[in-house]
């Protein structure tokens, strides 16, 4: 143990997606900032975003309309202040990206605006069908060349270091640095958690592998509350194939006449919704889920083979090619599809500045719950949320008075063995958690399934905690623990909601409840039960 002066960083940002990089760039004019990435710079959901960013950019559109659409999509559970905040600050956030050089698609003199489900107006600015990648490239380039920003790759944050004199403050972030094989404490005056969502708690997900809910687990262990964790968005049609698992098959295929069939060739959306295959996403996802259960077949089929092959190839060239690589021909056969977890609406509870329950800890982007999305996210509001709340958090940090921590005692540990010799055990545990979440806390839930899930997830959490008593932590084992903990908190939150609203559908409570509420869960509330297992790290 040695006493150390403060590290060169004022703020540590955990995560380098749209949210983390935006905040870092906002801070770096005045501060030294460290940005952590658990893998490489490309690791995260942001580069995957296809559609675009929602903002009021047309003179016929208005903040009020954006607010109304978001609120309706969110099943009236949105926090009105957060919705107004995001909608009203959207145009400036987009202008900032344009000024930075993001090459948004143009239509003549203007930027092209597209429309997506739930929006009553054209308000999605985009860079072809690869908006996230275009935005991320520019933000990353700016961050990489900024003298006040240090980007650290292969640094997995797993805990916050509390101020010994004030339990409401932290003095740094504990990271597993795979480059120098050390567990280090990065001291700082403020922490921003921007680690993205937790869609990998489910067996099938459109997200890259980073989405294991790390930030939510870190915050929960440090005493922060998490909100609305039961609301997980599923995309209805992703490819069910080993070579390209959960590859997104855009809604436009159904828009151009594609139909959904079960294994027996029956169109099952008939009688489910008047709009058939073009019903709202949560309804289509639910119908597919029920069909899979009913037929006991692992997928359903998306069929557009009745259309002219030239039309199909012209409209969906990338998808057509990707499917050919999987030996599937979109023009000639029905394609196996399943819904997949896409977006985590709940997360660390924050205010309009992104502030958590801890004084100098902020959370932004998909990891946070601002109240913007309520019970269901409207398309393209998530990148907007990343930008607007990252800016607010960086401004709040710059306004705050940095705490005087004096000298701090830290202990860096040599991480001698990063080999995962127990990979089969960890993989099996992760698969069991994902399977419980998929089957019992997925698209359709019921009381008995949720109770079973809580019991099963408690056991899995106990198993990984026990593993950590006897083994050196590795990036993989920490992720598995995080995933197990967040899954359990999600199952608990789902049990609390005895109604069906937005993305949460419980067969035993199929109606909307009379009272609107946010579910809030803390580890402290469960401390008696989980002290032994969850708080061990
Ligand atoms: C296929 C797909 C399409 C989408 N399309 C759209 C769209 O069109 N419009 C829209 O608005 N949204 C879209 N979304 C959602 C949107 O992309 C995400 O919500 C958003 O990019 C999240 O950004 P973020 O900065 O919060 O997190 P991410 O971009 O996910 O970044 C998280 C970062 O945290 C790091 N990290 C995670 N854990 C740790 C840890 N323990 N230690 C250190 N670093 C860590 C990761 O390495 C990564 O750098 C889409 C998502 C997907 C998957």
Image (cartoon, rainbow, N blue to C red):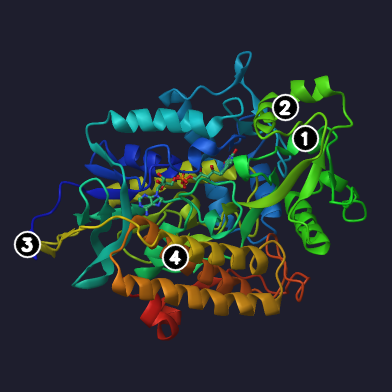
Which one is in front, 56 or 214?
214
**Observer able to see residue 522:** no
Q: Name the mark nearer the viewer: 3 or 1.
A: 1
Q: Quadrant of residue 441?
A: bottom right
User: Which residue is disc 3 drawn over?
Assistant: 3
Q: Which of the 4 quarters of the picture holds residue 282?
A: bottom right
Q: Earlier in the sequence, mark 3 or mark 1?
A: 3
Give whichever of discs 2 and 3 has the lower sequence position.
3
Distance CA(mark 4)–CA(mark 2): 41 Å
Q: Is residue 458 visible?
A: yes
Could you tell me residue 85's position as x and y percent? 52, 48
At label 2, counting other C-alpha atoms closer than 10 Å, the crowd grade (few under 14, some 14-19, many 20 or more) is some
Closest to the camera, between mark 2 and mark 3, is 2
Q: Is residue 37 left or right of residue 98?
A: left
Tell me which residue sits at (55%, 24%) in the image. Answer: 104
User: Label 4 belongs to which residue?
Assistant: 425
Residue for badge 1: 253
């Amino acid at each position: 143990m040695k006493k150390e002066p403060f590290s060169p960083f004022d703020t540590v940002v955990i995560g380098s997606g749209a949210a983390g990089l935006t905040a870092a760039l906002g801070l770096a004019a005045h501060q030294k900032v460290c940005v952590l990435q658990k893998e490489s710079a490309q690791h995260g959901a942001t580069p995957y975003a296809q559609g675009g960013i929602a903002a009021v950019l047309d003179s016929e559109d208005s903040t009020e309309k954006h607010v109304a659409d978001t609120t309706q999509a969110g099943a009236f559970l949105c926090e009105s202040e957060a919705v107004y905040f995001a909608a009203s600050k959207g145009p400036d956030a987009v202008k900032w990206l344009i000024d930075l050089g993001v090459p948004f698609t143009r239509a003549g003199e203007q930027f092209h605006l597209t429309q997506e489900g739930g929006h009553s107006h054209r308000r999605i600015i985009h860079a072809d069908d690869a908006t996230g990648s275009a935005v991320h490239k520019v933000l990353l380039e700016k961050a990489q060349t900024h003298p006040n920003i240090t980007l650290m790759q292969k640094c997995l944050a797993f805990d916050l270091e509390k101020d010994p004199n004030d339990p409401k403050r932290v003095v740094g972030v504990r990271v597993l640095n795979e480059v120098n094989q050390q567990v280090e404490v990065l001291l700082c005056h403020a922490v921003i958690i921007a680690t993205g969502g937790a869609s990998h708690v489910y067996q099938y997900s459109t997200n890259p592998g980073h989405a294991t809910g790390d930030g939510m687990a870190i915050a929960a262990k440090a005493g922060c509350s998490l909100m609305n964790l039961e609301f997980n968005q599923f995309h209805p049609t992703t490819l069910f194939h080993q070579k390209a698992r959960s590859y997104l098959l855009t809604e436009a295929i159904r828009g151009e006449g594609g139909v959904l069939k079960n294994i027996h060739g029956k169109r099952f959306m008939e009688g489910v919704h008047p709009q058939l295959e073009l019903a709202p996403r949560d309804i289509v996802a639910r119908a597919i889920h029920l069909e899979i259960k009913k037929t006991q077949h692992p997928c359903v089929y998306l069929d557009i083979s009745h259309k002219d092959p030239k039309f199909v190839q012209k409209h969906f060239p990338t998808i057509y090619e990707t499917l050919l690589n999987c030996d599937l021909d979109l023009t000639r056969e029905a394609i196996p599809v399943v819904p997949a977890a896409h977006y985590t609406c709940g997360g660390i509870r924050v205010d309009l500045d992104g502030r958590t329950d801890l004084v100098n800890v902020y959370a932004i982007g998909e990891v946070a719950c601002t109240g913007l999305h309520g019970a269901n996210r409207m398309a393209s509001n998530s990148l907007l949320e990343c930008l607007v709340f990252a800016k607010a958090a960086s401004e709040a940090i710059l306004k705050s008075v940095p705490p005087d921590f004096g000298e701090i005692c830290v202990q860096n540990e040599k991480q001698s063995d990063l080999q995962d010799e127990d990979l089969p055990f960890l993989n099996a545990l992760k698969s069991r958690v994902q399977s419980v979440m998929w089957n019992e806390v997925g698209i359709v839930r019921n009381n008995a399934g949720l109770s079973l899930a809580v019991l099963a997830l408690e056991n899995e959490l106990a198993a990984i905690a026990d593993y950590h008593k006897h083994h050196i932590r590795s990036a993989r084992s920490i992720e598995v623990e995080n995933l197990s903990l967040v899954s359990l908190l999600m199952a608990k939150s789902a049990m609390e909601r005895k109604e069906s609203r937005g993305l949460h559908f419980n067969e035993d409570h199929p109606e909307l409840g009379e009272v609107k509420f946010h579910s809030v869960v803390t580890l402290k509330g469960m401390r008696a039960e989980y002290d032994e297992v969850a708080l061990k790290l």
